[in-house]
Image: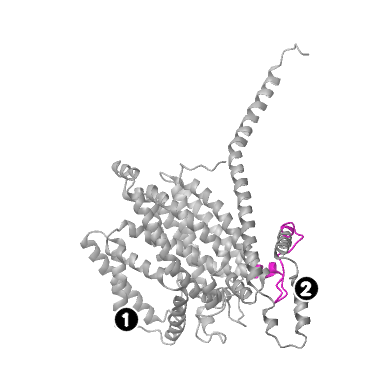
Amino acid sequence: MVTSETSVPAGTAVTSAASGATPRRRRLSVSAPTLTFIGRRLLSSAIVLLGATFIVYMLLAYALDPLEDLYASSAPNKEQLIQARIRALDLDTPPVIRYFKWVGGVLGYLIGKGTLGTSWVTGQEVTAMLSTAIPSSVKLIALATVLAIVLGVTVGIVSALRQYTGFDYSVTFLSFVLYSLPSFWVAVLLKLWGAIGFNDFLADPTLTWGTIALLSVIGGAIWQALIAGPRRQRLLTFGVSTLATATVLWAVTASGWLLDPSLGMAGIGVLGAGAAVGVTALTTGLQDKRALYSSLTVVAIGVALWYPLQYAFVDVTALMIVGLAVVAVAVGVLVGFLFGGPDRGQSMRNAAITAFVVGGLTYVDRVMQVWYKYSNSTKINGRPIATIGSQTPGLSGDYWVTTLDTFTHLVLPTIALILISFAGYTRYSRASLLEVMNQDYIRTARAKGLPERVVTVRHAFRNALIPLATIVPLDIAALFGGAIITERIFSWSGMGSLFIHSLNARDADPIMGYFLVVGTMLVLANIVVDFVYAALDPRIRVNA
């Protein structure tokens, strides 16, 4: 048997097994450094988090006195109450021992057999308090953070491309002003003008011709600064945009649109077509007709489906809305695939983005349709923009009414958070793009004759995002920490309010739960930053 020859089929089998094992070993050898890196970072992050929680716990143990209110009490059984609270809070045990008991509870919670502690003030489990506060804070801050990032990066890039122009100086001045404003002062002004003033204006929503003229001139100045170009082109842009702004303001005032707003098929079609042209101009250029036509086709499909969707929206749920959004993007991908073009992927991407925008416009239009019913309900009484809370007490209605109610409570704190964060993102993105635009590879790309759009979008923009990769994940992680000042002013029950109330009540366990959540998200965000760097910069590799 040892000296017998190997048959051909057997030899083939051996070769196949060897060739199958080699790619597996290669995949393991490639992924091993990354897995080792992740393991090392998780271990080091756990050590950092353990040390940080120990320091915070010790500070709380020696700085907060949960017996302070009893010391000032004049109750006849004062000593008994003090001894009872000492036993309940285990204050006779040294703080270090209490800390390790708390760590044991956290580890037990991770395997389903422990707890993060209990509030001695309310008697609630910390996990229950966090499960209520975290979604509230994320709802409040998520939209503000996303909008601040998008608007800040966009304006910063345009400012860098218009360096040393009036627009650049205006953005720089506005950024420094917004960055220096106290958040509580901004929130109070928004309450005064954005809620009370706007609600008063809705009683008689008319604009004088002087106000219309002033707003139109401001709008024209902004548009000519954005589009730029030769003097003649800027004057033409200023005139057209001023006239268009005046026409829109007059139409809104004359028709009473603010009392019963809607977009309708015409509004969705116009805004969708503008989005299609804008997306195509930024990504592929208007010379790519296939990409442009695929985006415009998606707009036409969205307008055609507007009326049938009104029936689908009757008994809708949040899950159905998510499903419709996925279907809209899938339709855009399919339309782009069918149109093809020099680069089929670009057509698919443009059509998918446009489909998502058109779907969002359709959703906003449906929410607008309940505005009149909502603002004239007995609970609202003609004053729809709220100043406190996350919902109107006692208000009942379908999905669209509750969604509009959530929006009216979110609009002011969201604007307050955007104004504060917008300045930082604008300055970061402007400085980063200016540095990138002076690099040698940008000059090489221009020397090759590439269009300026390609140089900016394809070559400069991606590398300009690298410095932002440090702060964006950390800001997103900070979502779970809430906005303490904003939540306090607008009476929003989120993580910030949980922290303040627990601190005032000298309640250590909820404070430690707050710190554990925020600290965990921040150390995980630091790991994410490393992978974002590797994705944006091909010179960086994530390995052990």
* Residue in view at x 43 percent, y 81 percent: 193
Q: Are marks 1 and 2 in contact (CB under 8 Å)?
A: no
- Horizontal and vertical percent position of residue 479: 55, 64
- Horizontal and vertical percent position of residue 8: 68, 18
> Can residue 69 be seen here?
yes
* Residue in view at x 73 percent, y 71 percent: 91
Judging from the image, the colouring scheme is one colour
Type of residue at label 2?
A: Arg
- Crowd band around label 1 with a 10 angstrom C-alpha radius: few (<14), some (14–19), many (20+): few
Q: Which residue is mark 2?
A: 87
- Horizontal and vertical percent position of residue 383: 50, 84
Q: Does residue 323 sit above or below 457 in this rendering?
A: below
Magenta stretch?
107-132
Relative placement, left or right, of 327 versus 288 is right
Type of residue at label 1?
A: Thr
Q: What's the distance in space between the residues labelled 1 and 2, CA to CA?
A: 68 Å
In front: label 1 or label 2: 2
> Which residue ends up furthest to the top in the rendered image?
3
Q: Per the image, is 431 magenta? A: no
Relative placement, left or right, of 508 versus 413 is right
Front position in the image: 467 or 400: 467
Q: Quadrant of residue 499?
A: bottom right
- Horizontal and vertical percent position of residue 230: 22, 59
* Residue in view at x 30 percent, y 74 percent: 216
Q: Which residue is mark 1?
A: 211
Front position in the image: 160 or 85: 85
* Residue in view at x 53 percent, y 43 percent: 542
Q: Per the image, is 118 magenta? A: yes
Relative placement, left or right, of 507 versus 279 is right
Q: Quadrant of residue 35?
A: top right
